[in-house]
Image (cartoon, rainbow, N blue to C red):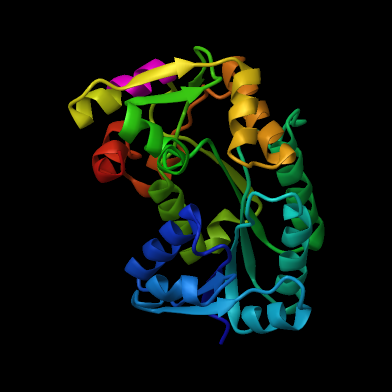
Amino acid sequence: MANKILVTGATGTVGSATVKALSSLGAEVRAGVRSLIKGDNLKRLPGVETVELNFSRPENLAVAFTGVGAVFLITPFAQDQVEMAQKLIDAAKGAGVKHVVRLSVIGADAEPSIQIGRWHRQAEEYLKASGLPYTLLRPGGFMQNFVNQYATTIKENNVFYQPNGEGRAGYIDVRDIGAVAAHILMNPSEHAGLAYTLTGPQALSGHEVAEIFTTVLGRPIHYKDIPEDAARTAMQQQGLPDWMTESLLELSAITRAGYTSGLTSTVQEMLGREPHTFQQFVEAHKDCF
């Protein structure tokens, strides 16, 4: 019986949070990973098995989808993410998967002016055209990106740099994305054909984020708004490819312009509890900062 739930990109921030949430609900989970070694921690969770996803071998994908009833389709932040999404959707259709939940991005339903939005919109349209029952999740910026991108400068210099001006963002904790995804994957028919925009409970400016860090960490943390050119140079010096640098700068531009400040109540409505606040996120990750 096809009752396993496959999570692609399972070792990423959202993927791992979803696998943990599904495991806690007693689901049979197949964690799709690029490297089986990287999936060892997930394999220790109750009800979780790992499977390698090799995009250059369609037969490998076919095996990964065998016996799967529902899929959480996550692709990495990469130039070929649309192609990867299409291959996964094709594999899901070929295996007779009953429902696909797709991790997209906030604003993908509009005419996206930024590259990340355009990529996700293309993947959404391909999924819709496939005929597979689907649900779309469109989250805002992840709180956990502060761990990935700013932990070093906060820990060493008590500061983080962003070209975001006074713009606000409704950052969401990936634990809430994972919990919402798990809820839908366990009850997919109730959410067929629907799209959900997910945000945290507050739209925060850089200075407000710094104040929260200051309160939780017990030492002054500062937000420094920097010009776009300075941010571009810093990213290039870090070795980021040009396409990634420009994509990230586009995100900052729409934040400065006020397009990331909207909030939704979807997490609370779906889960019956409030989403995590930014302060709760920092408290849970104090050791990183």
Tell me where residue 96 sits by quadrant. Answer: bottom right
Tell me the quadrant of the picture where the N terminus can be found: bottom right
Q: Residue at x 54, y 19 (%)?
A: 164
Range shown magenta: 206-211
Residue 251 lies left or right of residue 141; in this view the side is right
As drawn, 114 above or below 195: above
User: Where is residue 97 shown, x and y percent of the image?
Assistant: 66, 74
User: Is-magenta flag for residue 75?
Assistant: no
Q: Is residue 8 left or right of residue 25?
A: right
At horizontal 50% and vertical 59% (from top left) the residue drawn is 15
- Reply above or below: 208 against 42: above
Please provide percent x and percent y for residue 47: 39, 79
Residue depicted at x 53% and y 36%: 140
> Which secondary structure is most common in the magenta stretch?
helix
Q: How many marks?
A: 0
Residue nearer the viewer, 103 or 37: 37
Please determine whether, in this image, residue 210 is positioned above or below residue 48: above
Q: Residue furthest left?
A: 218
Taking 78 as reference, is 118 above or below it? above
In what quadrant of the picture does the C terminus appear?
Answer: top left
Q: Position of residue 239 (x, y in %)?
A: 63, 42
Say left or right for 101 vs 141: right
Q: Quadrant of residue 6?
A: bottom right
Does residue 210 show up magenta in the picture? yes
| Residue most extreme to the bottom | 1
Q: Is residue 87 left or right of residue 215?
A: right
Q: Residue at x 46, y 48 (%)?
A: 177
